[in-house]
Image (cartoon, rainbow, N blue to C red):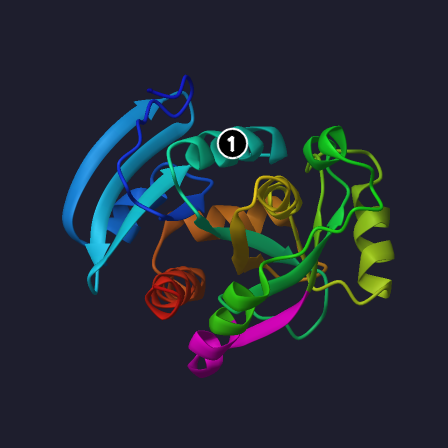
Amino acid sequence: MKQPHINLEEMNIKNAILVGDPQRLDRIAKFLNNVEELAYNREFRSLKGNYKGIEVIVISTGIGGSSMSIAVEELAKIGVKNMIRVGSCGALQKGIKIGDIIISCGAVRDDGASNAYVDVKFPAVPDSEILMDMIQVAKDFPHHVGITHSHESFYIDENAEQEKYWSSKGVLGADMETAALMVVGRLRGIKTGSVLNNVVIYGSDTADAIGDYVDGENASLIGEKNAIITALETFVKIK
């Protein structure tokens, strides 16, 4: 049965990479063989391809936990068992450079989507096998492993105060989707993980840094490549 939002039917593929930006699929496709575009509805653009004998779906989820949760639910219904987010984040600690990758070992559930599913006391944590394999794969890349913060909006009035608070607790970086992925995945019996490319130096202006990321070849694009490789090689390990 075709799913109503991602517009995909069961295709016997158990691995999926989830990204925010639909254009990121074009960059991931360069790492795959036998690439086939699948669907494009709203924010959900998808393709499939082969990496070292492993079939992979790549799908965009747009911005935020609500869209992420829809993608997780519908991918699960078509048979996907392993899901890794390859996303971007802003650093919350000094010393994390542009293009460093952050592997999330757990997420602060400060989003609306995960809280709609289950009490906030339920943890947002990755699958342990996926986490350990990602750490092993990323050993040759500039990377950090720690807690990330999943928030609801870039533009709340207290954003700076919120960043300062979670930074003081040792949280490494902030995105908007990891908590929803991990919570919904866990509730639905899906193995999940999240590897994030840092595009914002802690204390700098987010809009300027993201503009630099979009505009050209720089360290953030190297970080994105490293995050993509980390996800794909992890799928190879868990086959």
Q: Position of residue 199 (x, y in %)?
A: 54, 57
Q: Is residue 35 left or right of residue 116?
A: left
Tell me where the magenta segment starts and ends, as one range: 135-146
Extreme-bottom residue of the structure: 140
Q: Is residue 71 magenta?
A: no
- The residue located at (52%, 28%) in the rendering is 70
Q: Which residue is mark 1?
A: 73
Element on which disc 1 rests? helix
Residue 119 versus residue 44 in the image, above or below: below
- Please give the count of numbered marks on the rendered protein: 1
Q: Is residue 137 magenta?
A: yes
Q: Position of residue 4 (x, y in %)?
A: 41, 17
Q: Position of residue 230 (x, y in %)?
A: 41, 67
- The residue located at (28%, 41%) in the rendering is 12
Front residue of this view, candidates 5 and 76: 76
- The residue located at (57%, 65%) in the rendering is 103
